[in-house]
Image (cartoon, grey):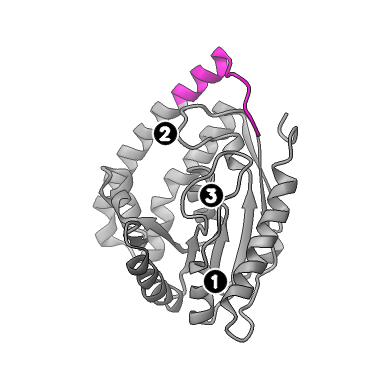
Amino acid sequence: MPQLAPTFEIRLRSLLFFLLYNLMGIVHSMISLLAAPFQTFEQRYRFVNLWTRATMWLLRTLNGIHIQVEGLEHVPRDEPLVIMSNHQSEWETFYLQLLVSPQATVVKRELLKIPFFGWGLALLKPIPIDRGSPASALKTILKTGKERLDEGISVVIYPEGSRQQPGQLGRFNAGGAMLACRAGRRVLPVAHNAGDCWPHGSLMRYPGTIFLRIGPPMSCEAGDVKGLNARVEQWIRDQAADIMQPGRNA
């Protein structure tokens, strides 16, 4: 959804969010690194994500961004899943860590080199891939992704690959569906409109509501990767068309 020109108040609150968000991230990542050797993975996961919870609190109290989640009843307990979501913002990379826990996210390996943020992310068993080599990236997703699932850790993958502009969806690749079929796991489809409030590549944080919708888990039928990917993509596109309709956040 196209955004109106930000007001002075939105600019000021967005700048304050940027400063506080990064300051908290720097401090918390250093504490997390010091505490990590003394924690189990589950303890480390919860501790690192205190920053995520603080970020959501900041967005709500400072920027007027609220979250409405539908379909929580579809998230099964004690079952690792392949979570496939559309990709618009940094927001979903945070919030999905709270929605399904624990989880490992497929990320560009360069992200782990970013000071503070990357160091904290590395503590959560992400799946780093080389985006410049699709064949190598897929091999890593299938091998390491199955290892995480076998450990009881859900895997998050964004089938569009890169973030899209608000109101848009990109082409879906089949890596997530292939992982689910190879590992014998179900896919949990997720759709949202986070780009309306937290656009990628922008300092602005626009007040409004982020709608996140969770669908029923989908199984791989007779090893049909293409069929599973098509069903997940169609569900996400159908839900996104409703969530991201013009005027929803006006």
Residue 63 picture location, percent across and down = 57, 27
Residue 120: x percent and y percent? Answer: 32, 50
C-alpha distance separating marks 3 and 1? 16 Å
Q: Residue at x 47, y 30 (%)?
A: 202
Query: Can residue 75 be seen in the rendering of this structure?
Result: no
Which residue lies most toward the top here?
A: 8
Which one is nearer the viewer's eye here, 165 or 208? 165
* Nearer-N-terminus badge (1/2): 2
Residue 172 location, quadrant: bottom right
The secondary structure type at the circle numbered 2 is helix
Residue type (three-letter) at the residue carrying disc 2: Tyr
| The residue stretch that appears in magenta | 1-16
Could you say whether the residue bearing mark 3 is in a helix, strand or loop? loop
Question: Could you tell me the amino acid type at mark 1?
Answer: Ala
The disc labelled 3 sits on which kind of residue? His
Disc 2 packing (10 Å; few <14; some 14–19; many ≥20): some
Which residue position holds label 2? 21
**Which numbered disc, 3 or 1, marks the residue that appears first in the sequence?**
3
User: Upstream in the sequence, badge 2 or badge 3?
Assistant: 2
The residue that mark 1 highlights is 177
Label 1: how many Cα within 10 Å (few below 14, some 14–19, many 20+): many
Q: Quadrant of the C terminus?
A: top right
**Residue closer to the observer: 70 or 204:** 204
Q: Secondary structure at mark 1?
A: helix
- Determine whether label 3 and label 1 are within 8 Å by CB: no
Is residue 2 in the magenta section? yes
| 122 displayed left or right of 53 | left
146 lies left or right of 10: left
What residue does disc 3 label?
87
